[in-house]
Image (cartoon, rainbow, N blue to C red):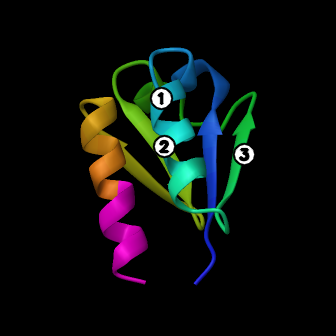
Amino acid sequence: MEKEIFFCENNVSKGLEEIIEKLEEKYKDLDVYIESCQGQCSICSEKYFVVIDSEVIEAETPEELYETIMDIRNNN
């Protein structure tokens, strides 16, 4: 199943660049978008997050976010 993943550029600049690169390398069919804002400013200021198919996924670290994305991807 293809997935669309949306990152907030402000959240990416806090250290998610490597995560995005790993996702793009591993999953060629994945559509990754970096947008100016996802409207999740309270989350963005304190945690790492991504929006996958309209669902907000939060994590304390970039690595935790990557693992959660991998779990979601592998379960679909």
- Distance from disc 1 to disc 3, alpha carbons, whole Å, reads 14 Å
* Relative horizontal placement of residue 6, taking residue 59 as reference (left or right): right
- On-image quarter of the C terminus: bottom left
Give the residue at mark 2.
Answer: 22
The reply to whether the C-beta atoms of the residues labelled 2 and 1 are less than 8 Å apart is yes
Q: Where does the image place residue 60, in percent across and percent down from the top left?
A: 24, 32
**Magenta stretch bounds:** 69-76
Q: Position of residue 10 (x, y in %)?
A: 60, 19
Query: Which-is-in-front pick, marks 2 and 3?
Result: 2
In the image, what residue type sits under mark 1?
Answer: Glu
Checking the image for residue 32, the label placed there is none
**Label 1 or label 3, whichever comes before in sequence order:** 1
Q: Secondary structure at mark 2?
A: helix
Helix, strand or loop: magenta stretch: helix
Dot 1 alpha-carbon crowd within 10 angstroms: few under 14, some 14 to 19, many 20 or more: few
Q: Position of residue 71 (x, y in %)?
A: 30, 66
Is 31 above or below relative to 40? below
How packed mark 2 is, by other alpha carbons closer than 10 Å (few <14, some 14-19, many 20 or more), is: few
Label 3 belongs to which residue? 33
In the rendered view, tell whether residue 24 sits above or below residue 19. below
Identified by mark 2, the residue type is Lys
The mark closer to the camera, 1 or 3, is 1
